[in-house]
Image (cartoon, grey):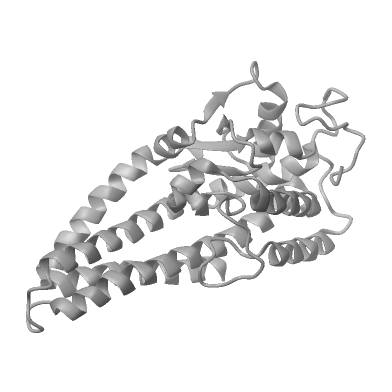
Amino acid sequence: MNYLRTAILLAGLTALFMGVGYLIGGAAGAMIALVVAAATNLFTYWNSDRMVLSMYGALEVDRTSAPDLVGLVAELAGRAGLPMPRVFVMDEPQPNAFATGRNPENAAVAVTTGLMHQLSREELAGVIAHELAHIKHHDTLLMTVTATIAGAISMLAQFGMFFGGHRNNNSGPGIVGSILLMILAPLGAMLVQMAISRTREYAADNLGGRIVGQPMWLASALVKIENAAHQVPNVEAERNPATAHMFIINPLSGHGVDNLFTTHPSTQNRIAALQQLAAELGAHTAPSVGANENYPPRGPWGRSSSRGPWG
């Protein structure tokens, strides 16, 4: 059902995009818009990961510079049946994380220093499992495509305002139609983009909980990240709000309820879904992450391994 809903929303976004092009320039305008969007998507397909990682100043780490973090990602990637993604750390006090890359073979997981400092190992495992779920579902590519189409719609709407306003109603949208187009088309694209993002977050929570074997580790992490989002600003995200949907929790602000203008489901709803998953898994949960590994008594996240996921 989640995949069907996502497909319907993506089809609606594409139809909106083609419709805007048609209103501005008829059939020729629709075709030109399609070619421009295709070229833009092709560029972002090959370069989206490098662009967003550079935007946030993320630095790649390995088993030498961050052995415990990279080892945790490797273990969870093995559980998920995924190739080992590249691992990046962002020097950012707000706890958060995202995944990027065009496919599982070219994927990256990025976490903030705030996430590593404020979460226990178990909670961090839940967050990483969630991001790996996005990679396994190919959500990283999907969200890049939706963001690109939404941006193209906004561009076309502005194009219609400047170049279509002089036309009459028989050959273009006219001045009134152009103004409405400039306002309503980007708004519609934004709503569809956000709806797709919220759908994929629920799916990633579910698979992430199954990968880590303990859904409540992720639930506990979501609570901490949500609270921090109210208190610790993410300056770079504020400068680039179009990337907010990539993070596990909206880095711009916290939201108490689902509505048309949120990029993520409400944290309360996500926790409720994870509680249902935990009850479904019951005693059939996977062993704790790192249970058979020789982790140091105190890991890189400043928590004793004997303490539970809630500190």
Q: Where is residue 129, by image quadrant?
A: top right
Identify which residue, 209 or 235, lies in the foreground. Answer: 235
Q: Residue furthest top?
A: 64
In the rendered image, the vertical position of residue 221 relative to residue 268, given as above or below:
above
Residue at position x 37%, y 67% from top? 189
Q: How many marks?
A: 0
Is residue 138 visible in the rendered image? The answer is: no
Q: Residue furthest right?
A: 306
Identify which residue, 303 or 237, lies in the foreground. Answer: 237
In the rendered image, the vertical position of residue 212 relative to residue 292, given as above or below:
below
Residue at position x 73%, y 34% from top? 117
Q: Left or right of 265: which side holds 148?
A: left
Identify which residue, 69 or 188, lies in the foreground. Answer: 188
Residue 291: image x %, image y %? 85, 34
Q: Residue furthest bottom?
A: 169
Residue 274: image x %, image y %? 75, 61
Q: Where is residue 297, by image quadrant?
A: top right
Q: Left or right of 206: which side holds 276?
A: right
Residue at position x 24%, y 66% from top? 157
In the rendered image, the vertical position of residue 82 relative to residue 261, given as above or below:
above
Q: Left or right of 13: which side holds 309?
A: right
Quarter containing the C terminus? top right
Is residue 147 visible in the rendered image? The answer is: yes
Residue 142: image x %, image y %? 44, 54
Residue 91: image x %, image y %? 58, 31
Quarter containing the N terminus? bottom right
